[in-house]
Image (spheres, rainbow, N blue to C red):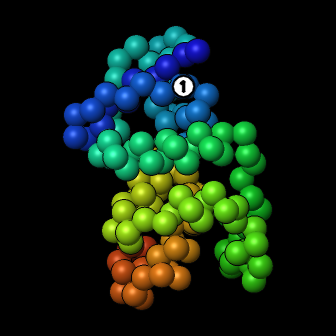
Amino acid sequence: MNRVPLETRDGFLIRIDFELLRRSKVMQEMCQHSVGDGPQQELLVALDHDILLMILLWMEFHKDDEEPAWVQMKEEPANVESLICDWDKEFLREKLPTVRAIMRGADFLDIPWLVKLCARKLRLRGPPDLYKLALSAISPLD
């Protein structure tokens, strides 16, 4: 198993299975620019270790799943609640600032599925100002 060393913004070194990183377009790009089968040096990830670990946990759970079609839709379908698995709902049972940090991290790593899940949670549970603030801090999905 090929492990990729990731160094977090707060100085932690996390080794993660190379295959797990396929969810992140940014990590795929970073790994492609390294020599050989995987990077020889640590890849610096501009996230704190606690948020990165949460994102990696989400990636591990969904490693064999295809991205749902609703993620690419501009408008959220009316039945989206039934399309989101219970594990994702439980995963996002965090305080809203943590959900916002996960969303920023998912945006940085270019994981649209997780970004949309977090944005939906912020829109449903948080005050409108928090949702607008979170959206202004990330790049557009289009």
Residue 27, placed above or below residue 107: above
62 on left or right of 107: right
Front residue of 82/115: it is 82
Label 1 secondary element: strand
Residue 71, placed above or below residue 26: below
Give coordinates of residue 2: x percent, y percent: 55, 16
25 on left or right of 10: right
Front residue of 92/21: it is 92
On the question of residue 34 being in view, the answer is no
Quadrant (top left/top right/bottom left/bottom right) for the N terminus: top right
Total numbered labels placed on residues in the image:
1
Front residue of 21/32: it is 21
Mark 1 — residue? 17
Amino acid type assigned to the residue bearing label 1 in the image: Asp
- Residue in the picture at 48% in, 48% down: 55
On the question of residue 122 being in view, the answer is yes
The single residue placed furthest to the left in the displayed view is 10
129 on left or right of 76: left
- Residue in the picture at 31% in, 28% down: 13
